[in-house]
Image (tube, grey):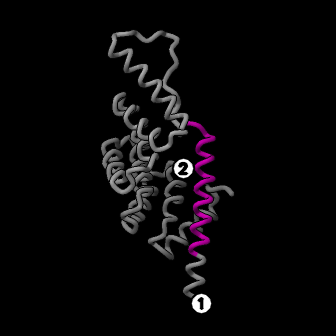
Amino acid sequence: MDLFNPFLIKKYKAILAKNPKSKVFCPLVQVYRLKKEFKKAKEICLKGIQHNPTYATGYILLAKIYKDQSQTSKALETLNKAKELSPDNHQIYQLLGEIYRGEKNLEKTLAAFKMVSFIKPWNQTAKKTIQHLEKILYQQKNGIKKPKNQQKDPPSQNSTDDKKSQKLQKLQKLLSRIERWSDNQENEKNS
């Protein structure tokens, strides 16, 4: 199924209108975010967080919106709230690493990706990023100049279309589970 399908978006909105506390706000926010409709995405996300104040994923999505809009301080503040709610969520540290990388803060980038690797030891992107950053920091500390042909920063996990496609598929599966749960709740009320 196509996540950008107007029928699905309408369905997400209907579920949310029927149950404002539903966590279906997350895939809807992601749709608007990926469509670069940040104002709409932020509005839905803030309402979703208001109804689900302990749901870390909502804060992660809000931080992504802020990051997309180059509002780094708001993104970091929002991620700190997410970290309080879910300190072992690798997505928080992944996003922190990407933000710090954008700010050229190598030490904080390294610390964030080390947390990603600690939480998900099989994450190859985190391992490669850690190796790369440790090498750069070692060279800087020891006054070693970077060779001209040295590889640039490894790509972030979110940089490829394949990764976005995989995320959309995961969101669709999540939505399907939420819909089944919602239907079950409705059936139980009617019984």
Residue 170 picture location, percent across and down? 60, 54
**From this viewpoint, which residue is outermost toward the bottom?**
191
Label 2 crowding class (10 Å Cα cut-off): few <14, some 14-19, many 20+? few
Q: Is 125 or 152 nearer to us in this picture?
A: 125
Residue 182 picture location, percent across and down? 56, 74
Residue at (53%, 31%) from the top-left corner? 155
Up the image or down, 53 lies above or below 18; here it is above
Residue 183: name its quadrant: bottom right
Q: Is 116 or 165 nearer to us in this picture?
A: 116
Name the residue that disc number 1 marks: 191
* CB within 8 Å, label 1 to label 2: no
Q: Is residue 109 left or right of residue 179?
A: left
Secondary structure, mark 2, is loop
Up the image or down, 106 lies above or below 44; here it is above
Secondary structure, mark 1, is loop
Residue at (47%, 9%) from the top-left corner? 147
Up the image or down, 29 lies above or below 75; here it is below
Majority secondary structure of magenta residues: helix
Residue at (63%, 53%) from the top-left corner? 169
In magenta segment, residue 167: yes
Mark 1 or mark 2: whose residue is earlier in sequence? 2
Q: Nearer the viewer, mark 1 or mark 2?
A: 1
Q: Is 132 or 77 nearer to us in this picture?
A: 132
Residue 119 picture location, percent across and down? 46, 44
Residue at (45%, 29%) from the top-left corner? 130
- Mark 1–mark 2 Cα distance, whole angstroms, equals 40 Å
Residue 98 picture location, percent across and down? 43, 37
Name the residue that disc number 2 marks: 35
In the image, which residues are magenta?
A: 159-182
